[in-house]
Image (tube, grey):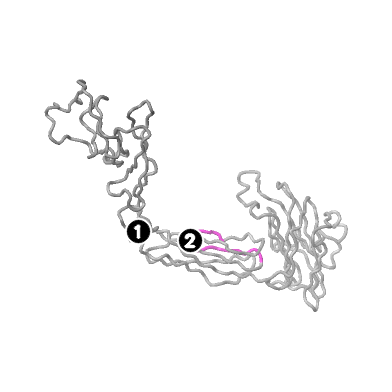
Amino acid sequence: MPARRSSQWKLPLAFIFCASPAGLGCVEPLQNPDLTPDPGAGDPGDLPDEPAWSDEVCGDGNDNDQDGRAEEDCPCTPQQSLGCYLGPQGTRGVGACVEGTQVCRGDEATEFGSFGECVGAVGPSPEVCDGVDNDCNGAVDDNDMCNSNPPEAICPGDLVAQALVAMPLAGGCTDDSGACTSFEWAVVSAPGGSVALPLPPNAAETTFTPDLAGEYTIRLTVRDAQGNFDSCDVLITVPTSEGLRVEIYWNDPDRSCADDDWEGGFPECDDSDVDLHMINTAAATWFSDADCYFSNCKRDFHSVSWNAAGEADDPFLDIDDVEGHGPENINVDQPAAGETYTIGVHYWSPDSWEGGAEILVKIYCGGDLPVDEFGPVALPEQDDFWRVADVTFDAGGCHVDAIDRNGQELTDQTAVRAGR
């Protein structure tokens, strides 16, 4: 029978209790006349046949009295180890509940020591739906919620959208155990260079504004209160409705500055400014009134007029991005027959960004896929100008002729202001 420690009597060191059967053996008490009762405990001669022991049992490794300790005040041999457990009776070794180890503290000069903390023991925890008996009652996932089915995510059907036009997306969810607790929208795939994201990303209804032509896959993930989840995808296609569309982007989008990067003062992000240019055969120089670029070709401030009357054959700059990566694009809805359009890229300013710009260019001729792509081409210095390609429309369709495909003949603004 394991020894018990007394809660009423204080025994001097001359008295030694018997340890557990797995422990130290039994040592006879020494004769000591100084054995004294704890004050108020009564006359030793009046002790009942069954003394008023505490619940702690030495040698079983359990926290019998549930005070957060096991084997406290129990004798042990220094460096002796013992399995220990601090959880409720009956849960040790059941389900997720496992015992730990405690080691007897002391040194060679000490005949008897005391047990240290119980390390590594795991007690019961609230039951969750994970295939484990968390509360150690012998039953796995014994929670009504664990028997529920996962939610079902509901996405809108596949959509066709216009670049730079906001599109609302309404998601939904059904769940037989209650309401869905979270919604999360994410871009799974997108055209190269796109930085478009659903906003807000964590609501049932969101808005997505595609920034480049091509296909986007947007995923909605829903979760319920039990952590179960489901996902669905919506395909958004952005066709190139224009006869001619040119897109550029540059550098790593993850380094680009966002609006809130300026709130803390001077940003460490990439705020470089690269500009797209397009001229027709009538233009004598770049940066002139016949050159479509940020100064004269934005839709809300437009003065470039090419060829026939009306705007159908005129170029328009949809985006002028001044804080890194882009994209920027120029569109001509109805290119004039026999006309040649020349594409240029200018490194306007690195601003606070200490470095060059790696440029990529896509050219579309009335289709969903680019007919040609250029880059990445490095513009290492501010004011570098890259003459990219000529795009000609004739009876045979659209033809792209590279001027400087690999960026080996860079020039600068002064030179191109003097000629094409």
* Other-residue count near label 1 (Cα within 10 Å), few / some / many at <14 / 14–19 / ≥20: some
Quadrant the C terminus occupies: bottom right
In the image, 217: left or right of 329? left
Say what secondary structure mark 1 lies in: loop
Residue sitting farthest toward the right: 418
Q: Which mark is residue 183?
A: 2
Name which residue lies at 82% across and 74% down: 338
Say what secondary structure mark 2 lies in: strand
| Image quadrant assignment for residue 85 | top left
Picture coordinates of residue 234, whole percent (x, y): 55, 69
Q: How many marks?
A: 2
Residue 316 can be seen, yes or no? no
From the viewer's side, name the closer residue of 2 and 220.
2
Residue 69 can be seen, yes or no? yes
Picture coordinates of residue 159, whole percent (x, y): 57, 71
What amino acid is found at the position of numbered circle 1 in the picture?
Answer: Asp
Which region of the structure is painted magenta?
A: 198-212
Name which residue lies at 31% across and 48% down: 92
Residue on which disc 1 sits: 141
From the viewer's side, name the closer residue of 414 and 255.
255
Q: Which mark is residue 71?
A: none
What amino acid is found at the position of numbered circle 2 in the picture?
Answer: Phe
Picture coordinates of residue 260, whole percent (x, y): 60, 50
In the image, 174: left or right of 189? left
Structural distance between the alpha carbons of marks 2 and 1: 25 Å
- Mark 2 or 1: in front is 1
